[in-house]
Image: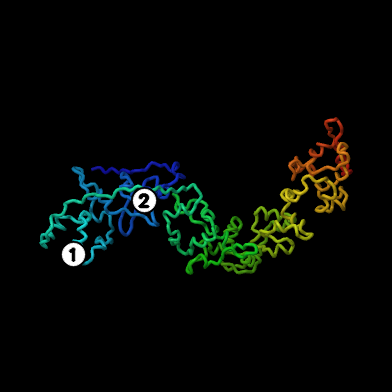
Amino acid sequence: MAVVAVAFVLPSRASSTETEPIVVSGLASRETCSPCHPRLDTSDGERVNFDHASHLLVQCMACHRAPAHEGGGSAVPAMESCFACHGLQHGPVGMVASGDCSSCHPESFPLRPVTHVEDWRAKPHAEASAAGVNGCLLCHDAPLDCDACHVEQNVDVVAMPALYLNALPRLEARPAVVVDRAATPTASQCLYCHPDIDDFDVEGLVFTHNPHLERAYRCVSCHPVFPHGAAGIDRPEMRTCMRCHGLEHNGKGSVASAECAKCHTEGFELMPSDHTRPFLSGEHSTLATEDGAYCSQCHAPSACVECHNGGVELADGRLSEKVIPEGHLEPAWRSDHGGVYLAQKGMCVVCHTTEFCQQCHETTMPHPATWLAAHSKGNGTLPKDCAVCHSDRKTCQECHHAAVRSAELIPENCVRCHEEMDTDKPTEIEVAGLAEHAVHFAVAQPDKKGEPYTCDDCHIGFGSGGVQVTSPAMGPHDMRLCYECHGALDLRNTLIAPYSGAELCLRCHSDLNI
């Protein structure tokens, strides 16, 4: 006889159901189950051996007469559901599915129900049978197991039914509970399946939701995406926790404790498995450079500095060498390091504490939350401190110039912040932008009758010029903006401002040879 192997494959519709809402209160179906259970795995449990693959031609709800997950648990189909097919004779076709106990139950499983106490054969089973004997026939052959005993014991009862009658409960309609996996995770999306959201056990982890809910943290703070999907359970990484644990809140202390024992059990192995001897002896430099935030979850800067200063015995027995990044040795580092810090291109905090920065900077580094409101009270070194990191001052100017958007271009309105515009000649002012403004203090258009310019005469929209320098070859001046007045005529065909072309440059730069 030829043996033909037939494989049943469900049509893939992952693309259409990937983000569709799930009716979790509904009966089992492919649409309800497959988003979290894409594989129809075999179940080899203590109670039953079951394989979904051999049941693919049967509707899910034929066995799952209630929602698969409800009230914090998983609803296992009752044995009555199985006997709708197992042990059923289908005319001349024969038995639909085997009714032998060993076909579904492992050898170690005790077949006698716990209700069948020691004296069950006497009075207890008679009282239970008063409600009906159909359930007894799931396991018992009536003529052999029941009737023969009743005759022997001279029990005055009629013969038992010969066959088990398939009788399943009616499906009850219920309100739909919908979970939208594409929506922002909220408690309402979890509580139907997890009425006790802390009823879980992750080895080595100590965690409860309640302290976080009391602080009104939103679920999305730790669960940015829906936690269940085809790939499994998406649990927050440790770095998600470290956004609060160990974080010092300005003036308020630590937001949450960073002690290991607060989140991990006593016997939990704290050292990651990848921290091998070679890793601890130098190979960790790659990870520390590419993902310093990973290291800082457990290691304070002091731990790194001690070893990087040299002379500390490594895991392989060698002594550590002094580690200084190559960029720190370049002459421009002193003026460039602020921009690197702001761009988060370096792991400055690995070696440098706030106290270290304040040896040079009188400004608190990094700035506390109250800094913006208080920074105007800084001392005379403040502007120099700011320039180390904030080389692009457009953001500063938008705020600092807000009060003078339509102010007149006269010394009184400028020298309060820019003293050099009052004490130095325009040609001696180092900052080109200030020099350009200073030369206009004493300039007035004829049709303005001696009135000085105002800021918004040139700065349309204010904060930055209408034309920006796009080529470094043009230097600090973009003369296109200047020539909108210098050498140009107004509507009356009158010269707006003198000095067109190179003549304007020679007003300040007499040695240009042009």
In percent of width and height, residue 326 lies at: 68, 57
Ranked by sequence position, the earlier of labels 2 and 1 is 2
Using the image, determine if residue 180 lies above or below residue 271.
above
Q: Which mark is residue 138?
A: none
Q: Secondary structure at mark 1?
A: helix
Residue 283 appears in the figure: no
Quarter of the image holding residue 489?
top right
Cα gap from disc 2 to disc 1, whole angstroms? 37 Å
Q: Is residue 263 left or right of residue 59?
A: right
In percent of width and height, residue 187 lies at: 48, 54
Numbered disc total: 2
Q: Is residue 500 left or right of residue 332?
A: right
Name the quarter where the N terminus is drawn: top left
Quarter of the image holding residue 333?
bottom right
Which amino acid, mark 1?
Lys
Residue at x-position 40% and y-position 49% = 24
Residue hosting label 2? 67
Which amino acid, mark 2?
Pro
Quarter of the image holding residue 121?
bottom left
Residue hosting label 1? 123
**2 and 1 marks in contact (CB < 8 Å):** no
Q: Secondary structure at mark 2?
A: loop
Using the image, determine if residue 393 lies above or below residue 490.
below
